[in-house]
Image (tube, rainbow, N blue to C red):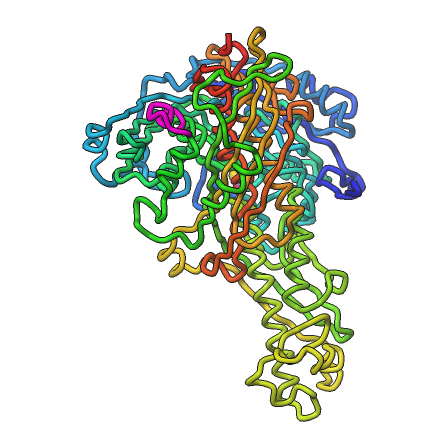
Amino acid sequence: MTGQARYAADNHPPDMLHAVLAGSRIARGRVVSMDIEAAQAHPGVVAVMAPGNRPPLALHPDDKSVPFSFCLDLLQDDRVRYAGQPIAVVIAETLEAATEGAALLAARYEAEPVEVTLDAEEVFVPQAVGVGDPGEFWHGDVEGGLAAAARRLEATYETPQQFHNAMEPHSVVAAWDGDALSLDMPTQGLALTQMRLAALFGIRAEGIHIRSPFLGGGFGSKLLTGPQVLGILAAKLVGRPVKLVLRRDQMYGPVTHRAPTRQRLRIGATEDGALTAIHHHVRTAVSRFDEFFEPAAGISRTLYAAPAIAITNEAVRLDTGTPGFMRAPGLASGSIALESAIDELAQACAMDPLEFRLRNYAEVEPVSGRSFSSKALRECYAEGAARFGWAGRPLESRQMRDENGLLVGWGVGTATFPAHMFQAAARAVLRRDGTGLVETGAHDMGQGAWTVFAQIAADSLGLDVEQVEFRAGSSDLPDAGIAGGSGHTATAGSAIQAAGEQVIARLTELALTDPRSPLFGAGNVGVVPRKGRLVRWDDENRGESFADILARAGVAEIEGHGSGAADTAMAERYAMQAHGAVFAEVKVDPDLGQIRATRLVGAFAAGRIINPRLVRSQYYGGMIWGVSFALHERAVLDPRTGRVMNADLGEYHVPVNADVPSLEAILVEEDDPHVNALGIKGVGEIGITGTAGAIANAVWHATGIRVRHFPIGIERML
Ligand code: MOS
């Protein structure tokens, strides 16, 4: 770690101005007046951008004709749709002057009544949830299965709104040169962002150059174009480069968040613990003006072998910003409910919760009968349990105490996340001197994408990492697709691999057809690239260097192109999921109710692991978010004003180091010949699933108190 990564806001082009957002203090209604003159008169203020003078756009901000568009608030009118919505932008010579100018606007409002809770009266049924999951799904005889069950559970679990708190807030440094736009801006989807901006401004996508070499976290919030567009508009208004950085409190409005859920689980099992049916019903929330439905019940389609499975959804409209993708969307919320319910049913069957999960192990995908492309979950359970020391866990709650008299509990949760693939392209070049250049517009959000892609690039060319120059993070490179859905390594990695293979195929052609080459005629044997040389597959000592082949052929360099995308035939034939098992220990103070996660062991199987250190770090990050989900994180919205009352890291609790337990992540071996050419599944998001439920279950085991309302607070322990 060097601290050398430059974020967008670290850039200061000459003549740059600072922009500051002014956000609405009401959640619904209209802005009646703003003292624009007072702001304008403040020393250093250059301009105030408001609906009256905002430069025109080619598309209405609510236009969704570009794929993956969400409605934006770009000062199109005086309406307010949620608290914190941008209502003006103040542009000044200094950040301080812009901040003071924004305060001087002293907006006055006409407020209307708001609804910000799941108790909203008007409920409707969405057609689809997430990205195209069916809104309703029935498989087998659910009611019959429940009726026939010897043990039944019907319980409601509730998860709160969570807001994005990446280390780096959304930001942009924008500079116009005629119709050409130059941006330093963190994004998880360079080409996607370029396309949306081109449509919004009515300019050519190729005229927009976005540099996004490093992001200080994305977690889904930087996939889609957001309020940074206001910084770009501000630069247009003043004709100078402009920097806009959201303040921490401004992250609780216009940049999407995790929707709240109320989930009703109805599940049944036979006397000896075989599931007979699962019905997972979700109530979630969307904004008043746009739609993203948290697909929280989706996990119940794939995780346990029940003969009957139903998923139903309903939603309410709230006066908040639109929910969106947030780390393990759907699965994080759904997992904590399902894993709690499974635990409760195991308890009803008087079975060890791990044994109960094994009893209902899905050998094939339950709803489709398809085989899994690979599934080493059984090994995850076994290796995780052994490492944690699960054996001998008392069945009943409140059985264990530590040396200080704290109640100790152990819980388990199953983790899973689908193996997604998107579209990507890459370019590889073998240079005359035998070194390589590989390019793709990949995104590094802290997960180590630069490192792992450079490794794949070097492998594909048969070179050492030091011999390959790897370029990423810029929109003028081949489109690497999105860094989302835990699919970046599989997707962009496949494109890189294919580009390298094409280079090697062309090089091979040169050598095999040249009578002067020691490889001449080795075609039937096959040749492979090794350490800068092309060698016979059956004898690595026979071959010649890349540089020699190029020199003799008189070729300056060889270029290859590759693409990565899902193999749709395979994706139809196989269910593709990563899996894991997480074991948690918590300690609860019997007098104070204070809860601490003290130990987590996660065992995960996610196909081929390119870089164990980076993968372990991803699992740790996910497991820590699981701790956060179970015990810490919650936005509190004031039902009278619709405002987030804890819009800062002082009161919106995320784990600090002192909250993070001893962590262990086990990389369980899994060979997947079907998922993609590299055999890679995603590792980024799976760690949240499983972990949150394991902790909730451990809290029950410690105390005998089953909390179905998350995060589990101290007040529920007393
Ligand atoms: Mo994600 S929601 O693509 O971290």
The x, y position of residue 692, in whole percent, is: 51, 29
Name the residue rendered at 66%, 73% in the picture: 529
- Indicate left or right for 555 with 265 as reference: right
Is 469 situated above or below 231?
A: below
Our reading of the magenta stretch's main secondary structure is: helix
Quarter of the view holding residue 568: bottom left
Q: Is residue 642 visible?
A: no
Name the residue rendered at 76%, 41% in the picture: 11
Quarter of the view holding residue 221: top right
In the rendered image, the residue lying farthest to the bottom is 515
Is 36 situated above or below 616?
A: above
Name the residue rendered at 73%, 84% in the picture: 554
The x, y position of residue 564, in whole percent, is: 52, 60
Q: Is residue 123 visible?
A: yes
Quick one: 168 or 340, which is closer to the camera?
340
The range drawn in magenta is 343-352
Q: Quadrant of the N terminus?
A: top right
The x, y position of residue 254, in whole percent, is: 55, 29
The verdict on residue 530 being magenta is: no
Is 153 situated above or below 180?
A: above
